[in-house]
Image: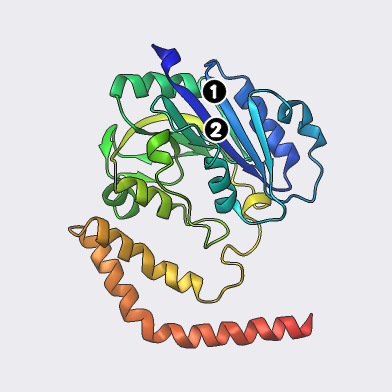
């Protein structure tokens, strides 16, 4: 029965070959045998020779971007290589993250037991804090995470391939804002949460998330602040917290223009001084 579930791990990487090797080691040591992996190098300038033995393995697909497009674009390209089959589940694993040895075995057991298309498990944040889960059971990403308190901080997602492939990450921003993708998933499915840690997240301040997530676009951060509650109320119109957040952002709009002008002047000053 367990052999019916196959996992595809998607791992973008950028200028962190040592971290990627640690990530790959944790995957290749898994006690569960049915998996493959897609690693996408997002235009790194550093050599990845250190990881060559892993990257050339038959269970791993290695893709390279021509330049640094950002983690969201990298994940989207990798999704194009995922098999759209009901017994396949996608797990997003960044290059500075590692799995516990029985992570996939645990995920498989819970997916089969709960019969769910979207499983969310805990992870260790910087080796000390855990993903907050109020309880085990069915949850709604928007009501319980985005504008709720039952599920907080980074978690480990296992998503059935047909659901995972229904949407893409928002590559309008280089990195971050993953909530847009998971909110889209929530328009089709609830999730099942279990307070079981299966991943270590080191949150290294380099590599994938280095640089400006909005590509120095001055309007994007303000638009995203408004778009977040707007998307939430469009999908969950009864969520009072989302409505209050939307109202707050609308009331702030008249004050945004001066901030944009000031930031624009500062950016021009820095460019001329460089």
Residue 53 image point, x, y percent: 77, 26
Answer few, some or many: residues within 10 Å of disc 2's Cα (few below 14, many 20 plus, some between 14 and 19): many
**Secondary structure at numbered mark 1:** strand
Give me the disc on residue 134. Answer: none
At x 43%, y 20%, the residue is 5
Q: CA distance from mark 1 to mark 2?
A: 8 Å
Answer few, some or many: residues within 10 Å of disc 1's Cα (few below 14, many 20 plus, some between 14 and 19): some
The vertical placement of 246 against 196, above or below, is below
Q: Tell me the quarter of the picture where residue 118 sits.
A: top left
Q: Mark 1 and 2 residues: CB-CB less than 8 Å, in contact? A: yes
Residue 224 image point, x, y percent: 43, 67
At x 52%, y 62%, the residue is 172
At x 53%, y 48%, the residue is 76
Residue designated by label 1: 35
The vertical placement of 115 against 72, above or below, is above
Instruction: Identify the image quadrant of the N terminus.
Output: top left
Q: Earlier in the sequence, mark 1 or mark 2?
A: 2
Judged from this view, the residue extending furthest toward the top is: 1
């Amino acid at each position: 029965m367990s052999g019916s579930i196959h996992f595809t791990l998607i791992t973008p990487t950028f200028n962190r070959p040592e971290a990627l090797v640690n990530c790959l080691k944790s995957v290749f040591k898994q006690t569960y045998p049915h998996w493959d992996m897609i690693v996408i190098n997002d235009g790194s300038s550093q050599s990845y020779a250190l990881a060559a033995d892993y990257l050339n393995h038959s269970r791993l697909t290695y893709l390279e971007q021509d330049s640094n497009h950002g983690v969201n674009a990298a994940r989207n390209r990798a999704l194009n290589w995922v098999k759209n089959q009901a017994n396949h589940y996608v797990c997003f694993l960044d290059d500075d993250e590692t799995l516990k040895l029985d992570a996939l075995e645990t995920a498989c057991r819970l997916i089969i037991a709960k019969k769910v298309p979207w499983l969310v498990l805990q992870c260790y944040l910087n080796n000390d804090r855990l993903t907050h889960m109020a309880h085990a059971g069915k949850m709604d990403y928007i009501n319980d995470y985005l504008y709720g308190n039952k599920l907080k901080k980074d978690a480990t997602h296992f998503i059935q391939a047909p659901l995972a492939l229904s949407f893409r990450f928002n590559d309008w921003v280089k990195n971050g804002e993953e909530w847009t993708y998971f909110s889209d998933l929530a328009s089709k499915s609830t999730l099942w949460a279990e307070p079981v840690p299966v991943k270590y997240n080191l949150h290294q301040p380099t590599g994938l998330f280095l640089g400006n997530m909005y590509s120095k676009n001055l309007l994007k951060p303000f638009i995203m602040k408004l778009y977040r509650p707007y998307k939430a109320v469009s999908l969950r119109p009864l969520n009072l917290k989302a409505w209050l957040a939307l109202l707050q952002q609308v009331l702030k709009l008249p004050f945004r223009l001066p901030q944009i002008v000031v930031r624009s002047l500062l950016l021009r000053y820095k460019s001329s001084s460089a």
